[in-house]
Image (tube, rainbow, N blue to C red):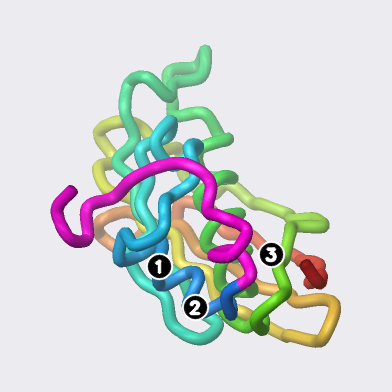
Amino acid sequence: MAAGAKRYGTASAEDRAKAGLEFVRGLVDGTLPLNTMARTLGYDIIEASEGRVVVTATPTAEQLNPEGTVHGGLAATLLDTCMGLAVRTLTGAGTGSTTLEFKIAFIRPITPETGLVRGEGVVLSMGRRVGSAEGRLTDRDGKLLAHATTTCLVFER
């Protein structure tokens, strides 16, 4: 496999126990596998820094709802991913995190013609047990498509 090539699966227990930023950067650079949902929906994790993660996807005709627009589940997944991983970047070794709840607002319809969309998650607050973040999903022109907030639980492995 080429260096940096993306692969899909489940990270090992050893890899999941890494400090959060190291773990998420492994998803970005391909040293760790993206989850299989990333393959299913065609998204990628492209940036990670302390408290911030960016994901991208290009909506397709395979993701349409009965109304002919892209199903809201794509936007929800992208936002849940970038916000949850933003929180994960701030967790220590031997811990993990999971979404407790999130709220999303859809602003504009997404279609296959929308082209590449970008989800950016940024941590708002981080404690020992709970982190919160906000996310913005934008089109290639920077127009807001959806936004969300999340609360994540931090747990020991």
User: Chief secondary structure of the magenta span?
Assistant: loop
Which comes sooner in the sequence, label 3 or label 1?
A: 1
Q: Which residue is mark 1?
A: 26
Tell me if I can see residue 138 in this picture: no
Q: Secondary structure at mark 3?
A: strand
Image quadrant in which you'd find residue 19: bottom right
Residue at 62% across / 79% down in the picture?
Answer: 123
Q: Nearer the viewer, residue 152 or 146?
A: 152
Mark 3 vs mark 1: in front: 1
Q: Which residue is mark 2?
A: 52
Q: Nearer the viewer, residue 23 or 58?
A: 23
Residue 4 vs residue 56: left or right? left
Residue 84 vs residue 53: left or right? right
Q: Secondary structure at mark 2?
A: strand
In this picture, which residue range is highlighted in magenta?
A: 1-17
Residue at 50% across / 16% down in the picture?
Answer: 67
Q: Which mark is residue 36?
A: none
Which comes sooner in the sequence, label 1 or label 2?
A: 1
Q: Dividing the image into 4 quarters, which one contains the C terminus?
A: bottom right
Residue at 50% across / 63% down in the picture?
Answer: 136
Q: Amino acid at mark 1?
A: Gly
Give the percent coordinates (x, y) of residue 126: 74, 85
Residue at 51% across / 79% down in the picture?
Answer: 21
The stretch drawn in magenta includes residue 13: yes
Q: Are marks 2 and 3 in contact (CB under 8 Å)?
A: no
Tell me if I can see residue 143 in this picture: yes
Q: Amino acid at mark 2?
A: Arg
Which comes sooner in the sequence, label 2 or label 3?
A: 2
Q: Nearer the viewer, residue 57 or 5?
A: 5
Name above or below for residue 157 compared with residue 67.
below
Counting labels gives 3
Residue 116 vs residue 11: left or right? left
